[in-house]
Structures are given as C-alpha cells and as structure tokens.
Image (tube, rainbow, N blue to C red):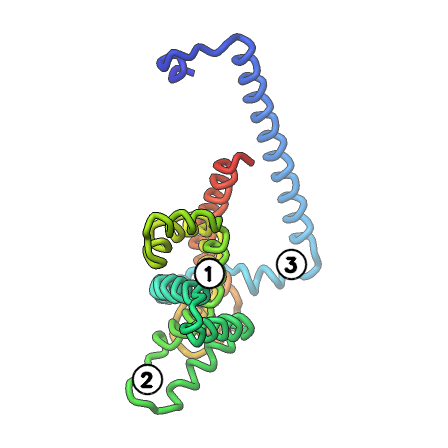
Amino acid sequence: MSERVTSGRVPSERQRERERARRAHGRRSASIATVSTIVFLVLVLWAVASSPGWPRVRELFFSWDHFVAALPDVASGFLLNIQIFVVAEALVLVIGLLTALARGIRTPAFFPIRALATLYTDLFRGVPTILVIYLIGFGLPALRLQGIPTNLVTLGIIALTLSYGAYVAEVFRAGIDSIHPSQVAAARSLGLSHAKTMRYVVLPQATRRVVPPLLNDFVSLQKDSALVATIGPLEALRQAQIHVASTFNYTPYLAAALLFLLLTVPLARFTDHLAARARRRRGA
C-alpha cells in the first residue's frame, strides 16, 4: 500500500475493503487447511500405530540405533549419488538439445541424422532405465574394445545420460515446436540464417517454456541415480544394502530415503513455483 501511495496511486476505500476481505479469506483458508492436515495426519498415524503388525514394523524399519549406525556410510554414498546426478544432468542437457535440433532438420541431405535421432529417442524411451544400466554396465566392458571405460560410476553415468537424454530431447522438441512459425519466418525475412534463427529467436523462448518439465525430469534423474547401485558402485542404496545384509534390519533404507527426500522435495517445490509463475505470466 505504501508503494502505491509513493507512486501517486491512492487506493479507494472500496478497494482497501476488498483487499482486507481478500486477506481475511486467505487467513481463513490457511487455517482450515492447517487444521484439516493435522487431523488427517493424526488419523493416519493412529491407524498405522494401532495396526497389529506395527511393533514388528517399528522394530524393522524405525530403529533409532540402526539409523544412527548406518547414517554415516549412507550419507557418504549419497555424495556419490550427487556427483552422478550433477555430471549426468549436464550431459543430458547437451544430448537432449542436440537430439531435438537434429530431429528438427528438414533438409533432405540430413535425413540420416534425423532418422538416427528419431531411432535414438524411440529406442531409449522404450527400454527401462535399469535395463539400459545393465546393458551399458556389463555389456560395454565385455566388448574389450580399446578406449571403452571400465569404471562403474562412469558406465552408470553413460547409461543414465543415454536414457534421460531421450526424454529431455522430446521436452526440448516440444518447446521448439511451440514457437509460432511466424516468428521463424520473421527472423528469416530479416536475413538471419537457420542457425541464427534457432540461436537468437527460437531456443531462448523454447527453453523458458520447458524449464518446469525439465526440472521434473531431473527430479526423476536424481532418484534413478540409485539404480547405478545394481552394477556395483557404493552409493547410498548400496551402502544401505550392506548394512541391511549384516543386521537384517531395514532402517538403513529409511536413512537413504530421507537423504533423497532432502534433495528431491526442494527441487520439486521449485518446479511448482516456476510452473505457477509461468501460469501467472500467461494470465491464467
């Protein structure tokens, strides 16, 4: 309100009344949502705690002693998950963007490149990520070719990059296709080449539009970094499995789950924030 007075705009008494009513409605909605959420959580906790098997579940999954014993090793493994995620994310962006651009080439002479990009997206979107990790992790070293990496973490990153690069390529392609053709025609009429049109006109707008779905894919990528454990690296899930195998208590899995939540939940909320901001810009 003070900003409006400073800028010369003085709200009328009717407008101030509407704003007071809007704030009161917001407080009332927030209070109702808080109370209903607390009641719901209490009912869920009561239902779980009163179930016949709860003492056994509490002993197997919620043991504080096992949690404290496993947490240092699981946290150490989780750092490897973060490293895998960060490297794979950068590579996925590059592979996804290049594949999307390749699929948009319409020149007949470049048809093999477009066909290869289409084949890549169809193949790696159709195969489960865990199978890709198995094929890359065990198949590539078995070829015994010169220059093929044998480090299990590197092989896991390659597998995640190939799998998620196909999904991200389709996200980029959807963003590029959402740009109205008139903007491309206007850029070309000004003398810009196809490459400059993509660089200065299409890609900046397309990238802004696909940021929320891109972040959503990266949330999934962060979780699927745990699948690399299937070929051997000692990341968080593998560390938890080692503790479970020695104690026959599943609490270390809970420790790993909490660490993943600490990373994925803020990223998911940031994605929601960007999506809401995009809706406001469109006036929805």
Tags 1 and 2 touching, CB below 8 Å:
no
Query: Where residue 250 appears, x then y in whole percent?
Result: 53, 67
Answer above or below: position of 45 versus 107: above
Q: Residue at x 47, y 74 (%)?
A: 115
Is residue 206 shown to the viewer in this render?
yes
Dot 3: element: helix
Image point 36% across, 53% down: which residue? 197
Q: Is residue 74 visible?
A: no
x 38%, y 77%: residue: 155
Nearest the eye: 264 or 170: 170
Q: Is residue 192 above or below residue 138?
A: above
Viewer-nearest of discs 2 and 3: 2
Splitting the image into 4 quarters, where does residue 100 fall? Answer: bottom left
The residue at the point 53 percent across, 13 percent down is 15
For the residue pair 99 and 214, the one nearer the viewer reads as 99
**Label 1: element kind:** helix
In this rendered view, identify the residue nearer to me: 157 or 171. Answer: 171
Q: Height in image: 79 above or below 116? A: above
Secondary structure beneath disc 2? loop
Kindly identify which residue carries mark 1.
255
Q: CA distance from mark 1 to mark 2?
A: 35 Å
The tag on residue 54 is 3
